[in-house]
């Protein structure tokens, strides 16, 4: 289990520093923050602001690098050379690490964003590039990645600690990948549906996938997308549920 300062039975994370209006409020409810560091969103000012807020809220701080594609918010596959990607990822993660170092904060983990997250979870080539970058910066950094994906075992074999992540606000396909956002029902926007998925994850019960299968996931952390318009509502409900688990 991933330890966290609020004593929840599972880590609760959100993607922040992306220009959303609810970052400060979300940080009161979550236990890990994945902070955009310039690839798809974020700059020096937003990183400093978000790290300061995360420090005050005593949450784990993670870098949230992506393909260098601000135009598409990092959510489209990108044709890029290995060297260009390695350089970009190194710069992104290191830029947040430098902010953390300057503020007396610890960079705890790395969670890739968007298309890079989805592709690296199943591509050994991209996964190894990501692992190489993390180990070059700090091999003690943990990798937060899609639960049950091939990258989980690959990263562990290469010596990284892994945080397996599941989602409160996204549906899955049978191979444990996230259903594409353009697929009907892929993004959960209803409080009751989000809570139902969280309850299933907590109880280790199988999830119904959008392609008609049952999928059982073992997760160390549950994610809420900070740019989901229901993110704050979801976070309030989930954190209240996790607090009840801790108390009883």
Image: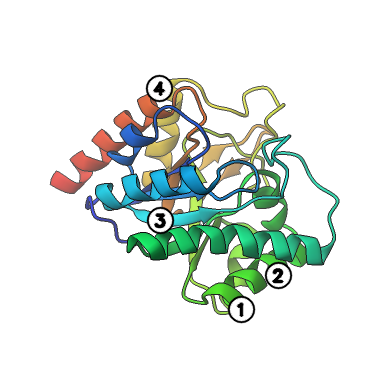
Tell me the SS state at disc 1: loop
Vertical arrangement, residue 163 with respect to residue 184, above or below: below
Tell me the SS state at disc 3: strand
Label whose residue precedes the other's in the sequence (1 or 4):
1
Q: Is residue 14 left or right of residue 88?
A: left
Q: Is residue 109 visible?
A: no
Q: Give the spatial CA distance, label 3 vs label 1.
A: 22 Å
Q: Tell me the residue that label 2 is attached to.
A: 128
Label whose residue precedes the other's in the sequence (4 or 3):
3
Residue at the image position 76 percent from the left and 39 percent from the top: 76
- Foreground mark, 2 or 3, reads 3
- Residue 71 location (% of width, % of height): 73, 35
- Foreground mark, 4 or 3, reads 3
Label whose residue precedes the other's in the sequence (2 or 4):
2
Mark 2 in CB contact with mark 1 (< 8 angstroms): yes
Q: Is residue 97 left or right of residue 87?
A: left
Q: Give the spatial CA distance, label 1 vs label 4.
A: 39 Å
Q: Tell me the residue that label 4 is attached to.
A: 192
Q: Tell me the residue that label 3 is attached to.
A: 61
Which quarter of the figure has residue 213? top right
Q: Give the spatial CA distance, label 2 vs label 4.
A: 38 Å
Q: Give the spatial CA distance, label 4 vs label 3.
A: 29 Å
Badge 1: few (under 14), some or many (20 or more) residues near its Cα, within 10 Å?
few
């Amino acid at each position: 289990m991933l330890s966290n300062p609020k004593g929840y039975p599972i880590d609760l994370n959100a993607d922040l520093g992306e220009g959303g209006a609810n970052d400060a409020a979300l940080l009161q409810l979550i236990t890990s923050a994945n902070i955009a560091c310039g690839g798809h969103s974020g700059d020096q000012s937003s990183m400093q602001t978000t790290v300061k807020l995360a420090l005050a809220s005593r949450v784990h701080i993670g870098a949230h690098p992506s393909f260098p594609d601000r135009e598409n918010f990092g959510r489209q596959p990108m044709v890029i050379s290995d060297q260009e990607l390695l350089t970009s990822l190194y710069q992104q993660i290191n830029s947040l690490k430098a902010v953390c170092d300057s503020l007396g904060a610890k960079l705890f983990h790395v969670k890739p964003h968007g298309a890079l997250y989805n592709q690296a979870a199943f591509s050994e080539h991209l996964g190894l590039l990501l692992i190489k970058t993390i180990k070059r910066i700090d091999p003690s950094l943990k990798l937060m990645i899609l639960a049950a994906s091939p990258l989980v075992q690959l990263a562990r074999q290469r010596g990284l600690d892994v945080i397996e992540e599941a989602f409160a606000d996204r549906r899955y396909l049978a191979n444990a990948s996230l259903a594409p956002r353009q697929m009907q029902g892929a993004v959960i926007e209803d409080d009751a549906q989000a809570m139902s998925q969280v309850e299933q994850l907590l109880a280790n019960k199988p999830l119904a996938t959008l392609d008609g299968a049952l999928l059982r996931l073992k997760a160390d952390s549950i994610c809420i997308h900070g740019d989901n318009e229901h993110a704050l509502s979801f976070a309030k409900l989930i954190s209240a549920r996790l607090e009840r688990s801790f108390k009883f």
